[in-house]
Image (spheres, rainbow, N blue to C red):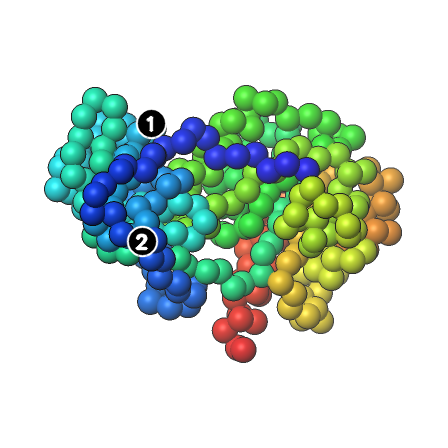
Amino acid sequence: MQALSWSPRFAVAVNRSCRKASSFQAFSSDSSNQSRGGLPRFFSDVLPPSKGSAVRVQGDEFWHMTKVLRLNTDDRIELFNGKGGLVKGCIESIDRTGADVVALENPKLVSTNTTQWHVFAAFGTLKGGRSDWLIEKCTELGASSVTPLLTERSPSISDNRVDRLQRVILAAAKQCQRLHEMTLNPPLKVRDLLPIGPKTLQEPKKRTKNVSQSKLCFIAAAEATPVLNVLALSKQEPVGSIIVGPEGDFTETEVKLILEAGATAVGLGPHRLRVETATIALLATTMLWSDTWRSTI
């Protein structure tokens, strides 16, 4: 399973005689709250390697910087690369094709040490911007990845929608000041979900574990044990996954296969929930549970 790549490229390195050796400063996600800056933030897959060096911002980010926010030379901004890298910079020059941004400090590298939650949701049939909302909120809540799940009642998702969702992820990451990108994986059929576990989620090309080996794998199901009761008896793990069915729910056969593979059914209350509501409710609960556990160690 190949993760869809960020596109297009937004920055290229600028050669400068004053460039120094790369000097990333490492920070944990608990230190000094590095993701809460007050400067306008832009995505760049290439960051200046050190203070005084520069990159060139182009494409959609350049357009947003100069045409939407009307920023100009000498304005200060932040650049992030979606992999935990963050640097404060200053717009040195602007021309018709891009802006040169000079680093005002050495870039910082912010690590994440909470549970990585991977979302598998059958949202291919959602209409009217509902899938955009699901992806946006998964990004804001901190999901590590989202995989569109193809089921008997939600058998497809258009390529055009996938491209749009990539743009939604980037916009949401900038808005919530998230430093680690959320991966949007290619659509996956239920029968292909069953061999997926923590190892596979981290290394998509190596299918070496299955659901039965994933100690935190929850499927939203009507009339199941409430999720808080299940979590109270669960042990924190570095990787977890949540599975949410389509409108009309999974078929009985699909549910049986997923449960037999080792997933745990959890309930989300007495009411029938939409796909996006169930996904966000379950993700928010598990993320908050992970944060609570982390704060006690």
Indicate the position of residue 86 as horizontal and vertical percent values: 34, 52
Circle on res. 14: none
Indicate the position of residue 265 as horizontal and vertical percent values: 76, 55
Q: Residue at x 54, y 21 (%)?
A: 160
For label 1, the SS is helix
Indicate the position of residue 173 as horizontal and vertical percent values: 41, 44
Image quarter of the C terminus: bottom right
For residue 99, side relative to residue 115 (left or right): left
Who comes first in sequence, dot 2 or dot 1?
A: 2
Find disc 2 in the rendering and name its residue: 21
Image quarter of the N terminus: top right
Neighbour class for label 1 at 10 Å: few (<14), some, many (≥20)?
A: few
Indicate the position of residue 35 as horizontal and vertical percent values: 35, 56
Q: Report, in whole angstroms, how far the alpha carbon at label 2 lies from the one at label 1.
A: 27 Å
Q: Which residue is drawn at 22% across and 27% down?
A: 67
For label 2, the SS is loop
Disc 1 marks a residue whose amino acid type is Gly
For residue 240, side relative to residue 77 (left or right): right
Neighbour class for label 2 at 10 Å: few (<14), some, many (≥20)?
A: few
Dividing the picture into quadrants, the one containing residue 198 is bottom right
Q: Which residue is drawn at 43% across and 65% down?
A: 28
Quick check: can you spot residue 99? yes
Query: Camera-side residue: 22 or 37?
Result: 22
Quick check: can you spot residue 285? no
Find disc 1 in the rendering and name its residue: 59
For residue 119, side relative to residue 25 (left or right): right
